[in-house]
Image: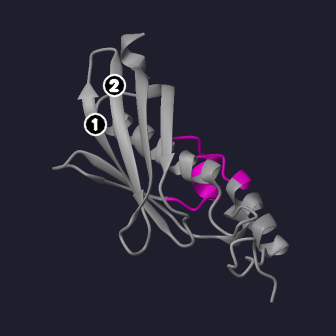
Amino acid sequence: MTTTETGLPAPRVDADAVSALAHAAASDPAWEFGSFFLSRFLQLDISYDETEQTCTVVLPYAPHLCNPQGSVHGGVITTALDISMGHLSKRFLSAAVTIEMQMRFFRPLTGTGTCTGRIVRAGRRIVHLESRMSDEQGRLTALGTGSWQRLDAV
């Protein structure tokens, strides 16, 4: 069995399955929140809590999303956190675009990750958001914070 530098078993990427997934994601012409190429390709499950005003994005583990160390690549984690914050703003405030985003990684993600976005401060033009990703054991794996420009204020 091949192992990574960290001693984890090396994920086996099924090229045919990844190709089929990419083809299916690209074949769907939908281009809206919750259904655009990246969300389909990453197989994200996006949901909202109306009472708490949160957006939860579940990122399923897949070997083709891993880095050479055998954990989910930080760029993929960043994308899921960014999507949770963007969808959060769109659902509860207005469509917005990322101005800046800071990331902190606390532990490798070697399974499914769940991130929940929250509004920190909702200004008239600039929105401050955060999203926290946890692993399957509920441990914090990453934290993203960002400032977003509301498109209804442009």
Q: Quadrant of residue 134?
A: bottom left
Quarter of the picture containing the N terminus is bottom right
Residue 128 image point, x, y percent: 34, 28
Is 140 in front, or is 131? Answer: 140
Q: Are marks 1 and 2 in contact (CB under 8 Å)?
A: yes
Which residue bears the numbered disc 1? 119
Q: Amino acid at mark 2?
A: Val
Is 121 in front, or is 109? Answer: 109
Quarter of the picture containing the C terminus is top left
Q: Is residue 35 left or right of residue 116?
A: right
Which residue bears the numbered disc 2? 127
Q: Amino acid at mark 1?
A: Ile
Is 48 in front, or is 122? Answer: 122
Residue located at (50% from left, 26% from top): 100
For the record, the magenta segment spans: 26-44
Residue located at (42% from left, 20% from top): 149
Q: Residues within 10 Å of mark 1 (few under 14, many from 20)?
A: many
Q: Is residue 120 left or right of residue 95?
A: left
Residue 28 magenta-highlighted: yes
Q: Which mark is residue 134?
A: none
Q: Residues within 10 Å of mark 2 (few under 14, many from 20)?
A: many
Taking 94 as reference, is 113 above or below it? below
Residue 43 magenta-highlighted: yes
Residue located at (83% from left, 73% from top): 16
Q: Secondary structure at mark 1?
A: strand
Q: Secondary structure at mark 2?
A: strand
Residue located at (44% from left, 42% from top): 144
Q: Residue furthest left?
A: 51
Between the residue at mark 1 and the residue at mark 2, the CA separation in whole angstroms equals: 8 Å
Residue 56 image point, x, y percent: 37, 55
